[in-house]
Image (tube, rainbow, N blue to C red):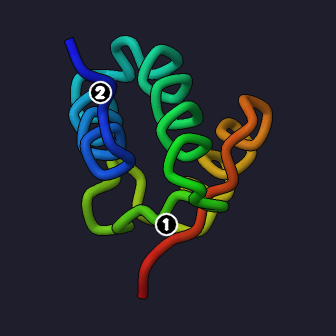
Amino acid sequence: MSEPTVTEAIDNIYASLQSDNADVDKHIAALRLAMAREGVKEAVFDPTKLAQNNRSGRKMMQAYFRQRGVSVKFSA
C-alpha cells in the first residue's frame, strides 16, 4: 500500500471528522508524514467541510492538530 499524499490525508481527516472522529489520530499522523515527505509547512482545510464551522471549532481543531505536530490553516 502506498503512502497517502497530503490531499488524500486531508480527505481522510474530513471523512474521519464526519464519522465522529473515528481514527482521527491515525489520519493526523499520516498527514504529518505526508507533509514532511512533500515539504509542506501547513495543512490547508476547507472550513465548509468541518462539523463545527465556527471560530471556536476551528481554533479547537488548530490546537488539537498543533499538539500532534501539524500546523493548520483554513482556506478563505
Tell me the quadrant of the picture where the N terminus can be found: top left
Q: Residues within 10 Å of mark 2 (few under 14, many from 20)?
A: some
**Residue at which label 1 appears:** 54
Q: Amino acid at mark 1?
A: Asn
- Viewed as shown, does residue 32 lie left or right of 46? right
Residue 17 on image: x %, y %: 33, 33
Looking at the image, which residue is at 38% across and 48% down? 6
Q: Amino acid at mark 2?
A: Ser
Secondary-structure class at tag 1: loop
Question: Residue 18 versus residue 73: which sits nearer the camera?
Answer: 73
All told, the count of numbered labels is 2
Looking at the image, which residue is at 57% across and 59% down? 40
What is the number of the mark on residue 16? 2
Q: Is residue 75 above or below residue 45?
A: below
Looking at the image, which residue is at 30% across and 52% down? 7
Secondary-structure class at tag 2: helix
Looking at the image, which residue is at 50% across and 51% down? 38
Q: Nearer the viewer, mark 1 or mark 2?
A: 2
Residue 31 on image: x %, y %: 48, 36
Residue 30 on image: x %, y %: 46, 26
Q: Is residue 20 above or below residue 66?
A: above
- Viewed as shown, does residue 16 lie left or right of 58? left
Residue 74 on image: x %, y %: 50, 72
Q: Residues within 10 Å of mark 1 (few under 14, many from 20)?
A: few
